[in-house]
Amino acid sequence: MIVAAADDLFYRQGFDHTSFADIAGTVSLSRGNFYYHFRTKDEILDAVIGLRLEATRAMLTDWALESASPVVRIKCFIRILIVNQTKIMAYGCPVGTLCQELAKLEHAAKGRAAEVFALFREWLAEAFRTLGAGDEAEALALHVLVWSQGTATLANAFRDEAFVRREVDGMCTWVEAQAARLSGTAR
Amino acid sequence: MIVAAADDLFYRQGFDHTSFADIAGTVSLSRGNFYYHFRTKDEILDAVIGLRLEATRAMLTDWALESASPVVRIKCFIRILIVNQTKIMAYGCPVGTLCQELAKLEHAAKGRAAEVFALFREWLAEAFRTLGAGDEAEALALHVLVWSQGTATLANAFRDEAFVRREVDGMCTWVEAQAARLSGTAR
DNA sequence: GTCTATACAGGGATAGAC
DNA sequence: GTCTATCCCTGTATAGAC
């Protein structure tokens, strides 16, 4: 599918640096025919962001179905850093890097790209709410995002596997500590 | 100065998206004359990275001279997020965004750009070492970098000032807790 | 729907006049 | 040193044949 190919290229090469020829070549289409499917580059970007939003929603729903425990669910999110470690070391986090590029391009779609972050934030906040975080839930969710984003950025800069494992372990024990703290205050 | 202008434009627009005409226009030079100073775009990039390395070194030395306390020094670093908040919300962290862009472009200068991160890491590690962190110092330094990078990325995505303050406060109390812990184990 | 051909702009880079 | 003129490539986008 064209959008999936564009998604991959935008991730690996960046949006601005990816040309129609790049995408058309990947899906074995001529440049001319490409415009039959998407009239402008912004249209492809919109479709890619839509695909990412959809894929993220599906993934989060899956994770929620797989495990009833909020702590386990949050750890599913954290584990992306391990599962996608190779890609992250090479290209960074797909969400963070796209948002930052669109910010520099002052692109209108930047807000929509940030919605992927918002999906994660809401999903994580829901998990923390289940743990009894109340008003604190959003802040805790954002902190998990902060930690994973920072880890992704520095994993990309330094390409240090041991570092990633250390931060992931740190995040996991932090989540457990928060769960313990929240179940304590709930009493 | 040309390099300073390029530095600013690379930060605000990204390296790839900034043209010779953009830089030449900012310093009121003709495009032709521009090539008298820099023969290729990579040469400008090299100069910009050199400038950033130099500026970072100078800043870190200043901070070290200003305060003898390692905790205060680390807080100087953390406070960049507040001091440069407006710019970070608009364009992200200069170091992180350049590294990530160069990674996607598979640019040879990516390693040199990451050296700015390495400067911060070493400087922070030295502060933690003074606190008695020993072998742990580098890991603690990297964690401060992780936290600040993640905060910068999400500050850029969500443009939420309260969030930035919260994370900065969290970092400061975390540093104090580490200092207390380390002075405890040193006994 | 898919192709070729082509228009057109922008950007990197060079040559050479002043 | 600074300028104009120019070359060439890439990239977006369109027209029109098949």
Image (cartoon, coloured by chain):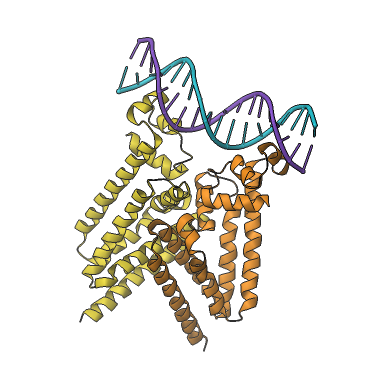
Chain colours: A yellow, B orange, C cyan, D purple
In this orientation, which residue lies closer to the viewer: A99 or B129? A99
Q: Is residue B25 visible?
A: yes
Q: Position of residue B27 (x, y in %)?
A: 65, 47
Q: Position of residue B102 (x, y in %)?
A: 54, 48
Q: Is residue B39 visible?
A: no
Q: Position of residue B72 (x, y in %)?
A: 54, 78
Q: Residue at x 34, y 49 (%)?
A: A112
Q: What is the tally of numbered marks visible in this picture?
A: 0
Specify whether A127 is left or right of D15: left
Q: Residue at x 34, y 59 (%)?
A: A79
In this orientation, which residue lies closer to the viewer: B70 or A88? B70
Quarter residue A37 falls in: top left
Q: Residue at x 59, y 46 (%)?
A: B108
Outermost residue toward the bottom in this view: B187
User: Is residue A160 depicted above or below B163 in this figure?
Assistant: above
In this orientation, which residue lies closer to the viewer: B78 or B110? B78
Q: Position of residue A53 (x, y in %)?
A: 29, 48
Specify whether A44 is left or right of B107: left
